[in-house]
Image (tube, helix red, strand yellow):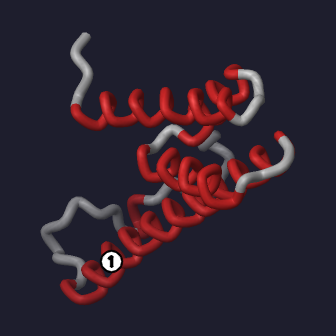
């Protein structure tokens, strides 16, 4: 299986993270775990930047920063999803529903007479 450019970059950044963690006196396994959790090249770069500039004094500080980076990434992804779906709703409101659409009408909805579910 060939690596794509992003996968190669991610693997290089993970290895840099493992090397940096090891050079700071922590077990390389910590670096591997951080690399798995951070997953994206941007998150890995952000962690490497933190390690180079902040000089954390404990593994707890490092893992706390990893959690903060993951939280920011998750928040950003949720924001992008919300923007996408908001755009779809706005498009629907702008264009309206065509009568030719395959949208069900209220008459097509199942009745609540006990024959459904």
- Residue visible at 17% across and 75% down? 99
- Residue visible at 19% across and 66% down? 101
- Residue visible at 62% across and 60% down? 53
* Residue 9 shown left or right of residue 117 in the figure: left
Task: Estimate how packed mark 1 is, as few (under 14), some (14 to 19) or many (20 or more) residues with alpha carbons within 10 Å.
Answer: few
Give the quadrant of residue 31: top right
Residue 40 locus on image (x, y percent): 45, 43
Residue 95 locus on image (x, y percent): 19, 84
- Residue visible at 64% across and 50% down? 51
In the image, farthest residue toward the left: 100
In the image, farthest residue toward the top: 1
Specify the quadrant that holds the C terminus.
top right
Q: Nearer the viewer, residue 23 or 35?
A: 23
Looking at the image, residue 89 lies above or below residue 36: below
Q: Nearer the viewer, residue 35 or 117?
A: 35
The number of callouts visible is: 1
Specify the quadrant that holds the N terminus.
top left
Looking at the image, residue 11 lies above or below residue 103: above
Give the quadrant of residue 3: top left
SS label for mark 1: helix
Query: What residue would you read off at disc 1?
Result: 87
Looking at the image, residue 27 lies above or below residue 50: above
Residue 8 locus on image (x, y percent): 31, 28
Q: Nearer the viewer, residue 69 or 31?
A: 31
Residue 82 locus on image (x, y percent): 47, 70
Q: Nearer the viewer, residue 102 or 57?
A: 57
């Amino acid at each position: 299986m060939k690596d794509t450019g992003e996968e190669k970059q991610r693997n290089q950044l993970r290895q840099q993270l493992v090397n940096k963690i090891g050079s700071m006196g922590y077990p390389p396994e910590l670096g591997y775990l951080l690399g798995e959790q951070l997953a994206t090249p941007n998150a890995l770069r952000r962690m490497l930047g933190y390690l180079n500039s902040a000089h954390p004094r404990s593994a707890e500080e490092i893992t706390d920063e990893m959690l903060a980076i993951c939280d920011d990434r998750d928040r950003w992804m949720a924001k992008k999803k919300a923007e996408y779906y908001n755009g779809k709703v706005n498009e629907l409101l702008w264009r309206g529903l065509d009568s030719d659409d395959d949208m069900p009408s209220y008459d097509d909805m199942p009745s609540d007479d006990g024959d459904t579910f």
